[in-house]
Image: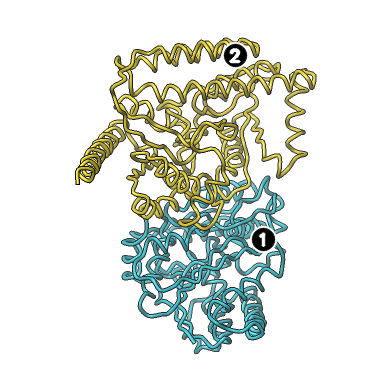
Chain colours: A yellow, B cyan
Amino acid sequence: MKISFPHMGYSHLAFKWMVEHMGHECIAPPEPSKRTLDLGVRYSPEFACIPFKYLMGTYLEVAEQGAELIISSGGMGPCRAGYYWVLHKYILEELGKDVELMAFELPMCNLKDFWQKLHRLRKTGGLSVKEFIEVLKLSWEKVKVIDDMEILSHEIRPLENKRGETTRRIGKALDMIDQAETLADIRDARQEGLKMINGVDIDPTHHPLKVGIVGEIYVVLEPAANHYLQIMLGEMGVQTDRSIYLTSYTRKNTIVNLEGDIFKMAQPYLNEAPIGGHGVNSIGETVLYAKHGFDGVVQLAPFTCIPEIVAKSIMPTVSREMEIPVMTLFIDEQTGKAGVQTRLEAFVDLLEQRRETRNISKDERLVI
Amino acid sequence: MSKIGIPRTLAYFLYYPFWKIFFDELGHETVLSSSTCKTILDKGVREAVNDACIPIKIYHGHVADLVGKVDYIFTPRLVSLRKYGDFGTETFCPKFLGLPDMVRWGLDNLPPLIDVRIDLKKGKHEIDFVCQEVGTMLGNSVPDIRKAQKKATTVQKKFEQLLERRVFPEDAMDLVLGNEPQKQRDFPEADLNIAMVGYPYTIYDPYLNVGLLKILREQGVQVWTQDMLSNKVMNKCGKTLPKQTFWYFSNRAINGALYYMKKPMIDGIIHVTAFACGPDSVVDRLIEIETHRRSSLPFLSVTVDEHTAETGVRTRIEAFLDMLRYRREAQ
C-alpha cells in the first residue's frame, strides 16, 4: 500500500523509515511550500486554522503522487484538531480524490479501534508482531535522536561565527540519521551528529539572550509554518528553548516536561485544564520560563486558534506579574517572512535594552 | 440580599429562567445587562482580546455594562451539560472554558465574579453541588438553596417545554417569568419553511444578526430552529455522522440541521455563524456537505461580525428566498 502522513518538522524522516520498514511504499510528504498552502487555502473553510490548511494542502499533494492511505491523528477535543480528519475526509471525497484517511484516536478513548488499525497496518505489510514492534521501537528511537539534534542546534546556532554553519551541519546529521538502519546505526549517527554540531566554530564570549517558545503544537513544530522562526532567532544570536517536542514526555533534561506541573503553574491565571490544544500549557510554560530567568517568551499560534486566544487574553497579566516580556504571533496564510523578521528584531532589541538597564540598576544597588 | 448581574448573551438565551428563579427564591435581586447595542459592542471590542470572536467580545461588553450596578456578576464556567459524544467528552468551546479568567484579567473594577464550574457530565446530582456552591457564596442556608433549586428546575422545565412548542426563547421567558409579553407584531402568513440553525446567541440576538429573525418572518417565512427539537430526536440524527463534534452548542446545531434536512416540509437551510468562530469553521462546512449529500435543499451560510449591516443581510436573504420560491414554482 502507498502510505503517507502529515509533515511536521523533521519527524517525517522517522515516519518515512517506519512506513517503509512496515512493508509499505512511502509517499513522503513534501515540505510545506507556497503551493501546499495555496491548495489548502482554496479547499479549506475560511476560518479553519492554518494547520488545517497546511494539512489539506499536503494531503492533496500526496494524493497527486498516488498515496492510497494517509495516516493522521484524532482527538477527544475540545480543540478542533481532533475533528480535522472527518472534515479532511469529507473534503477529499467532495474533490473526488481516491485516498483513504486513517485517523488514530487516543488509545485511552477507544482501545479496540486503535488495535484494529495497527493490526491492519501490520497485516497488509506482512510483518510478524515481533518485527512490527521492533519497527515501532526503532522509529521512536529515530524521533528521539532527531529531537536531540534539534535541541543542540538551537543552543549552538546563536554562538556560531560563520552564519549558517549549524544549519548546514544539522542537515548532514539528519541525512546520517536517515541512512541509519539498525539501533547501533542510529546510536552511531547520534554520536557522530552531536559531535559534528558541537564542532561548529563558536564565539564563547557571546552571551546570548534566552527566549522561550510556547504555543500551538503545529506552528511550533513545523518550521515551514512559522517561517523558520527558531533559526531566524538563532541567527540573530538568541538562544531559544522550545516547550514542545514530539518526545517531550520522555525527557527529563528539558525545562518543560511534565503536564501536571504545567497546569498547576497556570492555575492562578487560568483555573481550568485542559481547555484544548496547548492553551493552558502556553500560560504555564510562560510562568516556568520566567522562573528560569529567561529574557522573553514568544507565543506562536495559528489565526483563530481558540485555546491560544484564551491564553493570549490572559498573557498580559502573566507577563506583568512574572515580569517577562511576551510577544504573541498569530500566523495565517497572509503572514509574510519579512513581517515576522521585523517584529522579532524589534522584540530582540527590546529584550537587549531591558537586560542592559537591569544589569546597570543591579550594579548600582551593589555600590550602595 | 445582594444584586446579581447576569450578562444578556451566550447561555442566557437557554438557561436564564433557571438562574433568575433560583436567585429570586434566595431573596436576591437579578439585574440583566441591557440588550446588545452599539455601546455594549464598542465596550466589548475595546476590552476583549482582538482575536476573539464577536460573541465573546459582546460578552465582555455585557459584563462591562454591569460593572458598578451590581454586587456580583454571574459568569459561570460552562464545562459540560451532559455526557455525550463518541468518548463522552462533550464540552463547550474552549473560549467558554476560559471565559471567567478572560473577563477577570481583561476588565477593570470588577465586582466579585460568581465563576462556579458547571460540569454536569459526571452525574445528575452535579447540579445540586453547583447550586449549593453558588448559594453558599451568597450566604444562604442549605435547605433554602435546595428549595430554590427545586422551584428553578420546575420553571426551567416549563420553559424548555415551551421552546419545544416552537415559542422563541424571549417570548417563552416572558411567559414563564410572568412578565408583560411584548406586543406581537403581525407577520404575513408563512409560505416557506426554513430551518435556521446556529448558536442561540447568534440566532436570537437581534443586534448581533441585525434582526435576521424579523427579516425572515416579515418575508413570510416560518422559522424552525434546533431549540424546537428535543435532545432525544437530535441525538438520533447525530449517530449518523462518522464522529460527533466536541462542543455542546455545535452538536445541537449540526444534529438539528441533520434532522430538518430529512423533513419534506423544509424548503431551505440557513446556518448563522459569527466571524472567526473556531468551532463553526468545522460546523459550517460539515452542514454544507451533509445538506447536499442527504438532500437537495439549498443551503445559505450567513456570517455576522461587528460590521454587518442590515441592508447586506436583507439583500442576501431576499435573494435566497426568491430563489426558493422560483425553485418551488419550477418543480
Q: Are marks 2 and 1 on the same chain?
A: no
From this viewpoint, is residue A66 visible?
A: no
Check the residue under mark 2 and report the chain it is in: A
Q: Quadrant of residue A353?
A: top left
Instruction: Please state which amino acid type lies under the numbered disc 1.
Output: Lys
Do the residues under discs 2 and 1 have CB atoms within 8 angstroms? no
Check the residue under mark 1 and report the chain it is in: B
In percent of the image, x 22 and y 44: which residue is there?
A361
A1 left or right of A336 in image = right
Q: Quadrant of residue A117?
A: top right
> Of circles 2 and 1, which is in front?
2
Please name the residue that numbered disc 2 is placed on. A186
Q: Height in image: B85 above or below A56?
A: below
Please name the residue that numbered disc 1 is placed on. B263
- Which of A298/B58 is in front? A298
Instruction: Please state which amino acid type lies under the numbered disc 2.
Output: Ile
In percent of the image, x 71 and y 16: which residue is there?
A23
Q: Circle 1 — which element?
A: loop
- Which of B326/B272 is in front? B272
Q: Residues within 10 Å of mark 2 (few under 14, many from 20)?
A: many
Q: How far across and down, in percent of the image, does residue B280 sit?
A: 51, 52
Q: How far across and down, in percent of the image, does residue B104 sit?
A: 42, 64
A302 left or right of B248 in image = left
Q: Circle 2 — which element?
A: helix
From this viewpoint, is residue A70 visible?
A: yes
